[in-house]
Image (cartoon, rainbow, N blue to C red):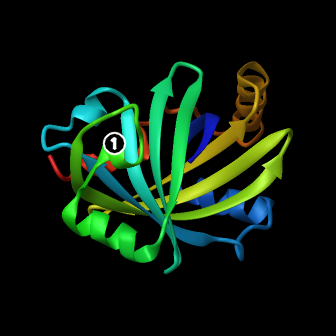
Amino acid sequence: MNRNIEIEFKTVIPEQKYYELLRIFDLENNIFKQVNHYFDTDDYTLNGQNIVLRIRQKGERLYKVTLKSQSEKGAFENHVVLNPEQAKDMIENGFQTRDFFCSIDYFVTFKVSLDNYRVSTPYKNGTLFLDRCDYCNVIDYEVEYEVDHYDEGLVIFKQFLAEHGIDYVPTKRKSERAFTCKR
C-alpha cells in the first residue's frame, strides 16, 4: 500500500476557459481518460465522514483502489494497485474495506462512475490539472493545482486565477458531484 498527502486547490471553470487554458499551455493533444468508480455504504456513511473510496481505472489494465480522507489542508490518500479481474469483481460485487485498508471496516458497493478527461503540466513548484468531468449526463470543468506546501500553493493558485481571469468558485469533490445523481 502506498500512502501520501495530497494538497490541492481547485475551482470550477466555464467550458470556454477550459479550452482557453488548454491552448495557452499547449495541452490539447495530451488529454487522457481515467474513470473513477466510486463506492460507499448503502447509507453513504463514508461520504458523510468526508471519506472518498474509489477505484481509478486508466486504460484496460491499470486499476487502483484509493481511500482518501479529507482535512482542512489536504487529504490523506492510501492506494492499492489491483489486477483488472480483481477490480472488475469489486465493481460488480462490492467489497469489504478492511481487506485493503485496516483503518475502516465497511461493506461497500459501487455507486457511480465519473469519466475524467485530464491533462496535467508542471506549474510553479506543483502540478496543474485541467479536468473535464462527465457523469450522470452532466459535463463540468475544473482546474486543480496540486502542491507539497499548503501556504505556498494557496498563494500561487490565487495568482494563477487572477492572471487568467478566473473567479474562484468553491466546488464539491468529484465524488460528491457524481453521487448527486444516485441519491
Q: Nearer the viewer, residue 141 or 162?
A: 141
- Residue 35, picture quadrant: bottom left
Q: Residues within 10 Å of mark 1 (few under 14, many from 20)?
A: few
Give the answer, above or below, for where 151 lies relative to 93: above
Is residue 137 something that shows in the picture?
no
Name the secondary structure under disc 1: helix
Is residue 32 something that shows in the picture?
yes
- Residue 159, picture quadrant: top right
For the point 75% across and 47% down, which residue is it?
127
**Going by the image, does 138 lie left or right of 22?**
left
Specify the amino acid type for callout 1. Arg
x, y (%) of residue 180? 23, 46
Residue tagged by mark 1? Answer: 98
Q: Nearer the viewer, residue 77 or 140?
A: 77
x, y (%) of residue 111? 23, 55
- Residue 124, picture quadrant: top right
Instruction: Kindly give the residue lying farthest to the right in the view shown.
Output: 124
**Going by the image, does 133 lie left or right of 24?**
left
